[in-house]
Image (cartoon, rainbow, N blue to C red):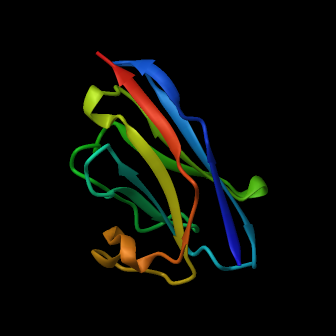
Amino acid sequence: QVQLVESGGGLVQAGDSLRLSCAASGRPFSWHTMAWFRQAPGKEREFVATSYWSGGNLYFADSVKGRFTISRDNAKNTMLLQMNSLKPEDAAVYFCAATGELLPYPANTLRNRYDYWGQGTQVTVSS
């Protein structure tokens, strides 16, 4: 089994930055593809960003392209989502997801392709 724990959410103003973390633990080599999804109240969970744990195959939703980046802290088995120039429409619960597969595009943007999920972290952006 794999456990994913997100952290770093909070309340910020429009234009501010936040960095979310997703710490992975459990069965080794079970998180070859990792992703971030988000879900706003009354909306479906939507794709935000994805990357291979090795660092390749980066994709971002059009709505966050140019503002969000992904990086990793390999020593801590942690994936980071740096969110800059936040907008009120970025407000949502952000979820980390992982799978042991190396998912190609566009499969890596589909939530049903991920086996493991974190509990989510709330991001609130005031205007």
Please report the residue visible at 57 percent of the width from the left and 82 percent of the height from the top.
100
Please report the residue visible at 61 percent of the width from the left and 45 percent of the height from the top.
21
Q: Establish if 28 lies above or below 22.
A: below
Q: Establish if 125 lies above or below 78.
A: above
Most extreme residue toward the bottom, as rendered? 101
In-image side of 28 versus 125 (left or right): right
**Quarter of the image where one finds residue 87:** top left
> Percent from the top left, x then y, of residue 61?
27, 53
Please report the residue visible at 30 percent of the width from the left and 75 percent of the height from the top.
105
Q: Nearer the viewer, residue 81 or 25?
A: 25
**Quarter of the image where one finds residue 29:** bottom right
Most extreme residue toward the front, as rendered? 42
> Percent from the top left, x then y, of residue 84?
40, 30
- Counting labels gives 0
Please report the residue visible at 41 percent of the width from the left and 28 percent of the height from the top.
124
**Quarter of the image where one finds residue 15:** top left
> Percent from the top left, x then y, of residue 18?
50, 30
In-image side of 109 versus 10 (left or right): left
The N terminus: image quadrant:
bottom right
> Percent from the top left, x then y, of residue 10?
53, 28
In-image side of 125 versus 4 (left or right): left
Q: Nearer the viewer, residue 55 or 77?
A: 77
Q: Establish if 27 lies above or below 4.
A: below
